[in-house]
């Protein structure tokens, strides 16, 4: 694609549109600019709301495959790639997932998290190589993320994953995007032109973060990683999370501090197991067995224990 063709393509994208009414924004008082920016951000959730049926359908498909051992893999460049890596990196401490279960791929590799890697986003071949390194399988899901919906790295990842039989999702912020068209589940959250022309780390980035929050969080709910709205699979890897673990057991059971401490010790620190030992009045090994037989779903294990 020539430079002229690329400029023409960018000019046709809603996310790249110029807003003449904001041409003097740099002359405004700081508080007025902040109010303008806050007003822009306020419309993002409504744009996400238009895509909720598509998001829900994608989540159900992802959860079905992850139940069979599949992985959730994000692929993007720049801000979109960083958001995918961020979402993936937060799943292990929040939901006690294996680090290989939710993966974030960013064009240009880890270096691109903190600096621009020139040309990486333009390479569909790089996306194919990154996915091949993960030995992609049919039960895996690849989510391509791109504000413009035209980034070759994201599209290349989705096209390659689909060719290999994996589930594919495309998250973009323009209508009729090539990324959404390439994926089985296309999600297009149209937030409109940015406050700063073409700076898609703003509204578009916020929209992508909201969608990725839903994809991972609700998938984990479907996988039994929560009990109600409690993070019962939280990994207690630091003092704050250890304190949170005790609070979660307390909220779920109403047990005393002594009972909670005993249950956590007996369960090896596993919150879900500790709750089961207290609510079902079973020992640690029995709780572990009930959870294994129930696919890790605490409600199912409790129902099984009550029979």
Image: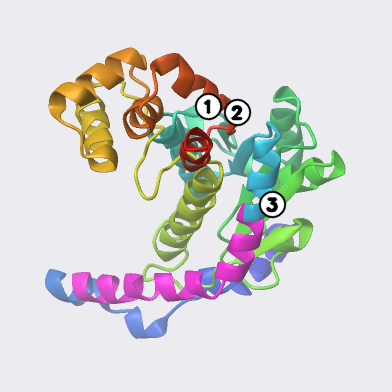
- Could you say where residue 281 lies in the image, as x and y percent from the top left? 35, 27
**How far is the residue under mark 1 from the one under mark 3?**
26 Å
Residue placed most toward the observer, 220 or 288: 288
Q: Which residues are magenta?
A: 34-59
Label 1 SS: helix
**How far is the residue under mark 2 from the one under mark 3?**
23 Å
Dot 1 corresponds to which residue? 290
Left or right side of 273 for 38: left
Left or right side of 146 for 166: right
- Could you say where residue 290 lies in the image, as x and y percent from the top left? 52, 27
Comparing labels 2 and 3, the label whose residue is closer to the camera: 2
Mark 1 or 3, nearer chain start? 3
Number of residues whose C-alpha sits closer than 10 Å to that of mark 1, classed few (under 14), some (14–19) or many (20 or more): many
- Please give the label number shown on residue 293: 2
Dot 3 corresponds to which residue? 61
Q: Is residue 40 magenta?
A: yes
Q: Quadrant of the N terminus?
A: bottom right
């Amino acid at each position: 694609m020539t430079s002229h063709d690329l400029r023409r393509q960018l000019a046709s994208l809603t996310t790249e549109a110029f807003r003449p009414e904001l041409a003097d924004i740099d002359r405004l008082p700081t508080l007025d600019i902040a109010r303008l920016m806050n007003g822009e951000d306020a419309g993002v959730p409504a744009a996400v709301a238009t895509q909720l049926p598509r998001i829900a359908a994608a989540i159900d498909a992802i959860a079905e495959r992850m139940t069979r051992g599949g992985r959730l893999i994000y692929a993007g460049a720049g801000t979109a790639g960083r958001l995918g890596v961020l979402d993936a990196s937060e799943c292990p401490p929040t939901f006690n997932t294996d680090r290989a279960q939710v993966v974030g791929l960013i064009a240009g590799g880890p270096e691109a998290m903190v600096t621009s890697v020139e040309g990486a986003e333009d390479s569909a071949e790089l996306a194919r190589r990154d996915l091949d390194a993960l030995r992609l399988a049919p039960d895996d899901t690849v989510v391509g993320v791109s504000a413009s919906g035209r980034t070759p790295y994201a599209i290349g990842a989705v096209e390659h994953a689909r060719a290999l039989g994996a589930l594919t999702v495309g998250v973009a912020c323009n209508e009729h995007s090539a990324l959404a068209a390439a994926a089985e589940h296309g999600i297009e959250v149209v937030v409109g032109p940015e406050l700063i022309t073409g700076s898609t780390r703003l509204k578009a980035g916020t929209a992508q973060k909201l969608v990725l929050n839903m994809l991972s969080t609700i998938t984990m709910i479907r996988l039994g990683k929560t009990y109600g709205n409690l993070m019962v699979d939280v990994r207690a890897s630091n003092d704050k999370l250890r304190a949170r673990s005790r609070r979660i057991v307390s909220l779920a059971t109403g047990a005393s501090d002594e009972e909670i401490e005993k249950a956590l010790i007996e369960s090896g620190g596993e919150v879900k197991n500790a709750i089961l030992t207290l609510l079902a009045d079973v020992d640690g090994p029995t709780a572990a067995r009930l959870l294994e037989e129930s696919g890790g779903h605490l409600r199912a294990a409790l129902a099984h224990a009550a029979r």
